[in-house]
Amino acid sequence: MTYDPNNHEHVERNREYQQNWYKNNKELQVERTKVQKKKNRERNKKYVEKFLASSICNICGSEDNLVFRKESGSHPKVARLASNPSALSTLIEEINKCVVSCEECVAEQKIYSKKNNSNTKKNKALGMHHSTAQHRLRGMLFYNALVELGKNMCYRCGEEINSSNELSIEHKTAWLNSEDPVYYFWDLNNIAYSHRKCNKANL
Ligand SMILES: [Zn+2]
Ligand SMILES: [Zn+2]
């Protein structure tokens, strides 16, 4: 008797047969799945090992202690996928989203991004780059000290310099093209204070 998919009885019998087969062979089926899962896990692990063995660190070129990393900073799922019986295509897809770096570079990057984060926080709080703010603060302190010393006079026009924004520090003898640039640059007697606009006019 041939199986007829349009015959209700046949279909019913077939379904019963399959159900019974599964019931009777449940252990076998479970065992088969287990073996398949183990095979997949081993295949994934080997794939990752081979991939790393043929890679170099994308930052320093080292061949040792390589790990997967995502440039977005999000967590790479390669290790988890490799230790699971995941489909190879899923694993490869995740690997393609990653870069390979050595552990030393990863550690350095972490420090770098932490530092960057704290700088970002400072910039945000100050409403400007914090090194600009630092520079401006030093300029104000210096100007205040000059006022206290009565030295806030322009070397060029002889008038008072009224704010730190107007202050420029210049070399009386232009150092760069002098016969001794290093000497004229560092010689404190060669330093004068002037208005920015007076200094510029004489450049
Ligand atoms: Zn490296
Ligand atoms: Zn002046």
Image (cartoon, helix red, strand yellow):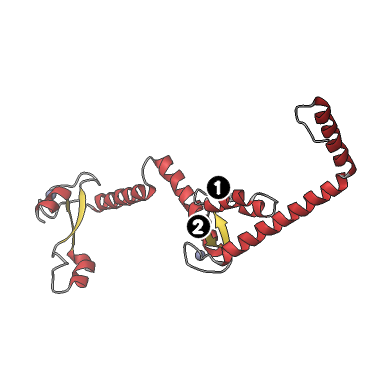
Q: Residue at x 70, y 51 (%)?
A: 85
Q: Nearer the viewer, residue 83 or 202?
A: 83
Toward the bottom, the furthest residue is: 179
Dot 1: element: loop
Whether label 1 lies within 8 Å of ligand 1 gets the answer no
Q: Work out which residue is located at the far right of the displayed protein and give it.
A: 24
The residue closer to the viewer here, 92 or 56, is 92
User: From what the image shows, is residue 156 above or below residue 104?
Assistant: above
Residue at image coords 14%, 64% = 174
**Secondary structure of residue under mark 2:** helix
Q: Residue at x 16, y 49 (%)?
A: 195
Nearer the observer, 143 or 139: 139
- 174 to the left or right of 33: left
Q: The N terminus lies in which quarter of the figure?
A: top right
Residue 33 image point, x, y percent: 78, 49
Please state which amino acid type lies under the numbered disc 2.
Gln
Crowding at dot 1, Cα within 10 Å, few <14 / some 14-19 / many 20+, comes out as few
Q: Position of residue 156 (x, y in %)?
A: 11, 54
In the picture of the structure, the residue carrying the numbered disc 1 is: 74
User: Label 2 belongs to which residue?
Assistant: 109
38 left or right of 136 in image:
right
Q: How many marks?
A: 2
Q: Quadrant of residue 15?
A: top right
Name the quarter where the C terminus is drawn.
Answer: bottom left
Mark 2 or 1, nearer chain start: 1
Question: Which of labels 2 and 1 is toward the front?
Answer: 1
Residue 144 vertical position relative to residue 2 in the rendered view, above or below: below
Res 134 label: none
| Distance Cα–Cα, label 2 vs label 1 | 13 Å
Residue 56's spot in the image, x, y percent? 51, 65
Q: Are marks 2 and 1 in contact (CB under 8 Å)?
A: no
Report the residue at 82% width, 34% height from top. 14
